[in-house]
Every structure is written in structure tokens, then in C-alpha cells.
Image: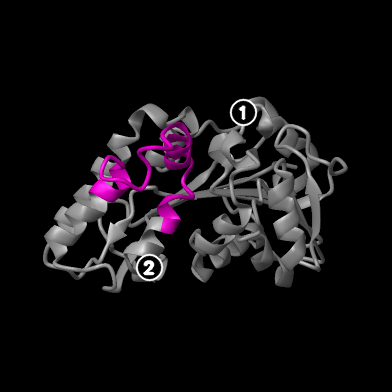
Amino acid sequence: MSTSFSNPDYSAKSYLDHRPRYPQQLYQTILDFHNTPSTTADIADYPTPQTKLALDLGCGPGIATSELVPHFEKVVAVDESEPMIQIASGHLPHVDCRVGSATRIPIESGTVDLITVATAAHWFPDQWWEEASRVLKPGGTVAVWTVSHQMMIEPSHPKTRELNELQVRLVEAFRSYLTAGNQYVIDMYDTLPLPSPELRFGPPQRIVWNREKVDDLKMFMGSKFNIDTLRKRLHTYSPIYRWRTDNPTKKDTEDDPVEQMFSNLKKISGWDDSTEFTAGHPLALIMIKKLG
């Protein structure tokens, strides 16, 4: 997982406060996939789905974890960052929160019905799929998803294309701070490594919402921002966090790429610091089942 999130200077509370919430339709899509036996393979390969235990892996402060609680008898949340687990356990009293990693999941073999990985799978080494296979029951589901770092700003604005181009340029400004994991996110998980055939998973199902433009408002994840609240969200992104750590005398000045972006945004849009606007994210989902 990203070492940025384990850094004692990284604020898990800020991550919880300023990262986006995922739409309910995303969780329903995952539950429908999990609860529906496959019609493309012998039913013996896909045992009847169960809802006894869900695992939110790379849970962070528990943004997605809480959405699993109504649908499973037990939910376990695992992250290798102790500060993240402390925040998660503080607001998720009905969840078993544990420190662990994607390659050493602290759960017994063959006990998990659903594994969710919310905007975290890009930090996992490829061999994490072996560990996922170990803890999953036959017929169990893995659902991994990510939001794009390139936000879409005010789709109804007449200059929305220019506003969104600023986001593309912002990513490029931090190019030297991007990791391989960040690139998987930029690619919307098109290139994310999937399990090898030896692990006996079924065919993956991929869905990408709003990749090039906003064509599904329910999945847009739009929120109201002003300049300051959008700034706080951007500061939670790992490449920007790393740049700010390395450039303490430049951050929050006119030499800061984030501040340069906001200056251009205000010029293009005509907004000031107090103007409220809508911004959201493209969203990519991969779902796959373990064979019986």
C-alpha cells in the first residue's frame, strides 16, 4: 500500500473528511453481481453466494466499510496503516477493524464471501490475488474500484472543457511524483493486474462510468465545493502530498501547481473563492468470482 498513508504526518482524519463518498448504485451493482449465480459457467463452479462475512481490504478510515454492514452478518476492515484503523474503529463500532496487509490478511482461509477494495488495489503487489484466493470461499466475490484523480468540474458550465483541462494539466504537473499505482488510477484500472489462471477465478466484469464525459449523473459522485474545500480534497491525494512534503517553502504559494490551477480556474470561470460549484469523478469497477 502507499507509504504516504502510513506516514505519521499524513492525516487519516482529513482523508475521511475530504475524500468522496461512493454512490449507492455502486454498492448495489456489487451486491447484485455477488448474489447472482453465474449463467455462463457450470453452476458447480459458482456455489450459491452467501452473505456471512465481508472484508473491506485497504479500508483506510472506513469510507466504504460502513456500506457493507447492512448486508452481511459480519464485516472485517483491514488496513496496514494504524492511524487509518484507529479512525475507522472510532466510527464503525459494529465492524472488526484489524491492522494487516493485502499479502498477509489476518483472516482464516476459506471464510470470506465478499472482498471489497475501494480505491486501494493499485497499491497492492500482484501476489495479493493469491491471498484473496486463500481467504475467499468458493463462489466468493472480489470487487475493486477506483475514482480518477482527474475531477470533472461543473458539467453544465459553458467552459467545462477548459475547466477539466486544468485537471489534466494538474496531473501532469505532478508527473514526477506519480507511482505505478497512481498510473493504474489514471488508466481507470484498464491495466490493473488480475489473477492468474492457476488461481481459478471466473471472467472479470468491468464497468467504467463517466470516463470522457458525464453521461450518468447517478454515478458522477458530484459534490458541492468552493476553492478551499476542493483544495483540501486535492491535498489528500498521494502525489500532491509527496510534493508538498518535498517542497515546504513552495507549497501554498504561487509556485504551488495546485494554487496555479486555482488561479486559472477563477480566470476561466469568473468565480471567486466563495463561489460554490459541482465537481465529481469518473469511476471504474472490476468484479470477479472465485470458482468452486
Which is more toward the observer, 61 or 116?
Answer: 61
Does residue 56 show up? no
Q: Residue 88 sits in which quadrant?
A: bottom right
Q: Is residue 34 left or right of residue 48?
A: left
Q: Secondary structure at mark 2?
A: loop
Q: Is residue 52 left or right of residue 271?
A: right
Mark 2 or mark 1: name the one nearer the start of the chain: 1
Magenta residue span:
232-260
Which is more toward the observer, 105 or 98?
Answer: 98
Could you tell me the amino acid type at mark 1? Pro
Q: Residue 270 sits in which quadrant?
A: bottom left
Q: Quadrant of the N terminus?
A: top right
Queried whether the magenta region covers residue 252, the answer comes back as yes
Residue 277 x/y as whole percent: 28, 71
Labelled disc at residue 222: 2
Residue at (22, 49) in percent of width and height: 166
Q: Secondary structure at mark 1?
A: loop
- Which residue is identified by label 1? 125
Mark 2 vs mark 1, CA separation in Å? 31 Å
Tell me how many marks there are: 2
Could you tell me the amino acid type at mark 2? Gly
Residue 17 x/y as whole percent: 55, 63
Residue 90 x/y as whole percent: 76, 64
Q: Residues within 10 Å of mark 1 (few under 14, many from 20)?
A: few
Residue at (39, 47) in percent of width and height: 149
Whether residue 43 is situated above or below residue 171 in the rendered picture: below
Whether residue 89 is situated above or below residue 146 in the rendered picture: below
Whether residue 288 is situated above or below residue 214 in the rendered picture: above
Q: Is residue 48 left or right of residue 281?
A: right
Does residue 71 show up? yes
Residue 245 x/y as whole percent: 48, 36
